[in-house]
Amino acid sequence: MRTTLLLLALIGISLSAVVKQNARKSASLRAKLIKEGTFSDFLAQQHLARVNAIASNSAVASQPFIDYYDDFYLGDIGLGTPYQNFTIVLDTGSSNLWVIDAACTTTACKGDPRSGYKKHQFDTTKSSTFVKTSQPFVIFYGSGDCRGYIATDVLNLAGLVYPTQGLGVSTTIASNLLDQLDQPIFTVWLDRHVKPAEDKLGGLITYGGLDNVNCDAQVDYVTLSSKTYWQFPITGFSIGSYSSNTKAEVISDTGTSWIGAPAAAVQGIVKATGAKYDFRNQLYTVPCTGTYPDMIFTIGGKAYHIPSSEYVLDLELGGGNCALTLFEEQGGGFGPTWILGDTWIRTYCQIHDVGQGRIGFAKAHHSEI
């Protein structure tokens, strides 16, 4: 799960109402640096910074959270009294809401100048409803960690207000706003832009109901196998001549841009598409004008097709090449072996049924493909 400013778990989100919230699509630092031809230099600098941090042998080391994994789908919330506005990753793969303290002045807190973005920071001194506790927290991600303390304050999400929202590491998953909605569900629709887009309408989250405008009326549900994430089983995957009927655990995650697959499936996809690994940009590429087979997932006895128009992405790499929205997932054991990120979610609207512990899929509508 790739992280920018803060994370919001919608497992607990849920007056009776149906509320819709737009999600904006934002181009990533990775796409910007690839276009400029400086991505490999950037990775080398990040590696050197990590080496220096380890060599310093200090008790506390700081590492920036770099937003370079493709695209994010963002939404706005208000926090505090009066509200301070934040643009956040609406991440169904996380149960944590955290913000950056305005008192922190490091680059990691304020944002890397090369990204073109300034991170939003929360000024706790300006909120009359802010309550600090003595409990510390720390969260580790693949790109670094964040540390701080637990607090509570007023949260405004698409007009829904929760007065004592916990910030930091949650000790429970509360129902929070569910009783304010018509149904204990929320629907995620993500749009698809043919070219990399920045700050465009990227989709819509509908709280309390289905999205009957952007999603097909037919919804097929599968029971969650774990409520830790939006996790469920698949019973098969195929692409071209590659096929696997092995049952596997997967999660649907709006906070992951691409599809994370086990090694065998990655190699099957590479063979079926003729993809080449781009060591400079650390991704698989194919000619943009090629014809490629569908990825097919079998879920609940139904075949779900992801066409190449969704998994072949033009990041302006040059040379007529496009990226495969694919990476190797290192999970396994009792956890998920696949992460179905935005590539999957753009193809099928995700109906998160909190009340019945299930997730549904409906074909998504797009104007550009």
Image (cartoon, helix red, strand yellow):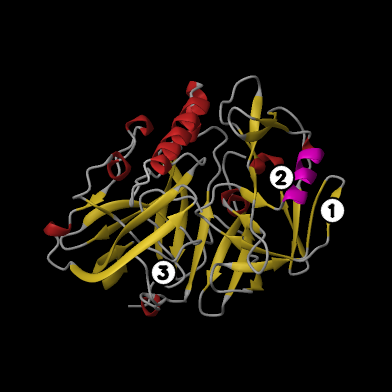
Magenta stretch, main secondary structure class: helix
Q: Residue at x 77, y 44 (%)?
A: 267
Badge 3 density bin: few <14, some 14–19, many ≥20, Cα 10 Å? some
Badge 2 density bin: few <14, some 14–19, many ≥20, Cα 10 Å? some
Q: CA distance from mark 1 to mark 2?
A: 16 Å
Question: Residue 332 magenta-drawn?
Answer: no
Q: Tell me, yes or no, if residue 256 can be seen here.
A: yes
Residue under numbered circle 2: 307
**Residue found at the very far top of the displayed protein:** 319
Q: Quick one: SS at disc 3?
A: loop
The three-letter code of the residue at mark 2 reads Pro
The picture quadrant where one finds residue 155 is: bottom left
Please state which of the two labelled residues, at mark 2 or mark 3, is closer to the viewer: 2
Residue under numbered circle 3: 18
Q: Residue at x 66, y 72 (%)?
A: 222
What are the residue bounds of the magenta stretch? 263-272
Q: CA distance from mark 2 to mark 3?
A: 31 Å
In screen coordinates, is 285 left or right of 208?
right
Q: Nearer the viewer, residue 205 or 118?
A: 118
Q: Residue at x 70, y 68 (%)?
A: 233
Q: Residue at x 51, y 63 (%)?
A: 187
Residue under numbered circle 1: 243
In screen coordinates, is 312 left or right of 187?
right
Q: Tell me, yes or no, if residue 197 can be seen here.
A: no
Locate residue 337, reporting x and y percent: 67, 60
Location of residue 16 with respect to 333 vertically, above or below: below
Locate residue 22, reporting x and y percent: 41, 53
Please state which of the two labelled residues, at mark 1 or mark 2, is closer to the viewer: 1
